[in-house]
Amino acid sequence: MKRSPYGAWDSPIGADLVAASDGRPGFLGAVGGELWWTEPRPNEGGRRALVRRKEDGTTETVLPEPWNVRNRVHEYGGRPWAGAVGEDGGPVVVFTNYADQRLYVFAPDRHREPLPVSPAPAFPGALRWSEPVVDLERSEAWAVLEEHTGPNPTDVRRVLAAVDLTRHGDAAAYRELTDDAYRFLACPRVSPSGAAIAWIAWNHPHMPWDETQLRVADITADGALTGARTVAGGGGESIAQVEWTRDDTLVFAGDRGGWWNLHWSDPHTGERGPVLEAEAEFAGPLWTLGSQWFQILASGDIAAVHGRGEGRLGVFDAWERRMNLVEGPWTDWAPGITAVGDRVYGLAASAHTGYEVVEVDSLSLAAKAVAAEHVPAVDPAYLPVPEHRTFTGPGGREVHAHVYPPRNPGFAGPEGERPPYAVWVHGGPTSHVRAVLDLELAYFTSRGIGVVEVNYGGSTGYGRAYRERLREAWGEVDVEDCAAVARALAAEGAADAGRIAIRGGSAGGWTAAASLTSPAAQGVYACAVVKYPILDLALWSGDDTHDFESQYVYSLVGPPGRLEERSLERSPVHHADRIEVPFVLLQGLEDEICPPAQAELLLERVKGRGVPHAYRAYEGEQHGFRRAETIVDAVLAEHALYAAVFGFAGPDVDLGLEP
């Protein structure tokens, strides 16, 4: 083992490999006995391909370039496809195409091109569709429709709508099933009998993890909805998912008891009761429409992703009333499980494997990867091993984090030298990070730079009380918790106190930038990487961002009467004079969620102050980077900043740091 400065170790994990591995399979579902899902293609412009696993076990990409199976509902997108078995026994699939946001119908075994079935919008992106449900008896697809009615981001309405699959995109090709009394709709589910439909609804100023309602309506013979009513939720309860049992009873994940637990409800009487009560989460934040944390099996048992901090898969035995864990090498299951009879399929990963399609026999609990199987790109000895830690924050509060010390089989640091560290801050902020394989993270740890991912107060996975620590305290609790973790690592000798960086994107970009201007983190960080950030709280509401989050800031910071005052207190753009360390700002120029104007405002206010900084803006990128060339440049820019500030040899990249 060679001794070499931390940060300058040779590693087989290059930026090209990071880009090639970006993203994971998503939106897993079944069409008859087949499995379908989407997969990222960073080298094909960042498109999402549709992949099919036939019953004989063979796998194929269904649609070639330029088809991009993705939508822009809520700007983050939602489940973009659904399917059913046609009269000829082959699959009939409905999907959204990113370029025009229209719904298409496609029967791959008939060897025909996809045909548009939703009308062309009045202007690009005006009609967006998500979470389709295919009804071949009616020759319709029912879906969440997001209609943009004007030039402003909040000129929008949402309804459930039915699209005629036999007509190809004329103006009369869909009919609205609900009115637009609710601003947001999600999770449409038709009962097994076909007599009713359930869905989730909520209104501003709530976010879906604050409060939602479970709505039910009867379906008439001609396919209309009648008798719409709320049967659960409201009053401060968040319902994240709903499904029907075979006898037309509802099962849903609600957090009235402080955790997203499973409950049942009679849709006729509204009576409800617990399926399983535990201090664990059986759902999560509904950032992406179509997330599925649980499924009801043919036996009546329930397969569910659940846990505290991490998501484990278990099968709830409805007869014996107990949860049986699925064993295996996977430490995390994504909210994307589906069922075929009594077999469960999900997306599972570990610290050394990416997300694979895994099949579970619900009776024996035997599990195996059946598709998208992980193929090691490098020797696992170069991959970091997470240490799950709970640190102490201000006032003695718990702060959860995953610590990844540097790891490389060929190198060690110089005697007596402590490694540099980067604090990685997740987005959301109502989200969390899980300890699974991330080659971007391994790029740094294999070069001798430690990483700690902080699930600061406000993160999900630890109950409602933990995530509500951030209520009206964004820019305070998150900054304090990250700083507390950084200081603790330095105090215990794990990190070099003079070589700690902070980086984050979106809401994580806010925390990273706010940490450079907040007295709570003064002197902690030597540099920062700020990606597609929020930088002025008062400019992140109403028509200055997208509709989904246009009132999110009120719960995070304060109501309109207090927002301006607190924005002046906390926003980095108002305290640019406090920034004393170098930083790199990375921004997609087509970002509708955190527009470039915020980044440009900060640049204007630090210009000429003598603080080295660089701005790298990317054409064609939205919120989060998807193109291989962008990902490569962003990784190398981050590495180059650390090399320049921490004092080791880095990549040959001209950051163009300006004073």
Image: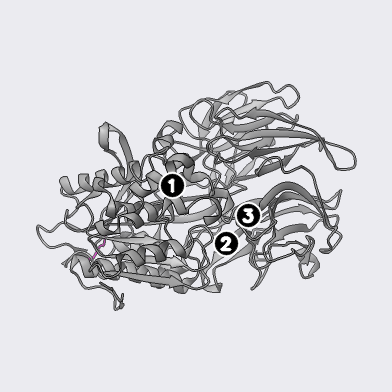
Real-space Cα distance between discs 1 and 2?
25 Å
| Residue 418 point in image, percent of width and height | 15, 56
Q: How is the image coloured?
A: one colour
Q: Is residue 555 above or below residue 95?
A: above
Real-space Cα distance between discs 1 and 3?
19 Å
Q: Quadrant of residue 642?
A: bottom left
Q: Is residue 276 above or below residue 9?
A: above
Residue indicated by mark 1: 429
Left or right side of 291 for 559: left
- Evaluate whether residue 132 shows in this view: no
Q: Nearer the viewer, residue 582 or 7?
A: 582
Is residue 496 shown in magenta? Answer: no
Residue indicated by mark 3: 73
| Residue 333 point in image, percent of width and height | 50, 46
Real-space Cα distance between discs 3 and 2?
19 Å
Element carrying mark 2: strand
Q: Which residues are magenta?
A: 406-410
Residue type at mark 1 is: Pro
At horizontal 30% and vertical 46% (from top left) the residue drawn is: 482
What crowding class fits label 1: few (fewer than 14 Cα within 10 Å), some (14-19), or many (20 or more)?
many
Residue type at mark 2 is: Glu
Residue type at mark 3 is: Val
Residue indicated by mark 2: 39
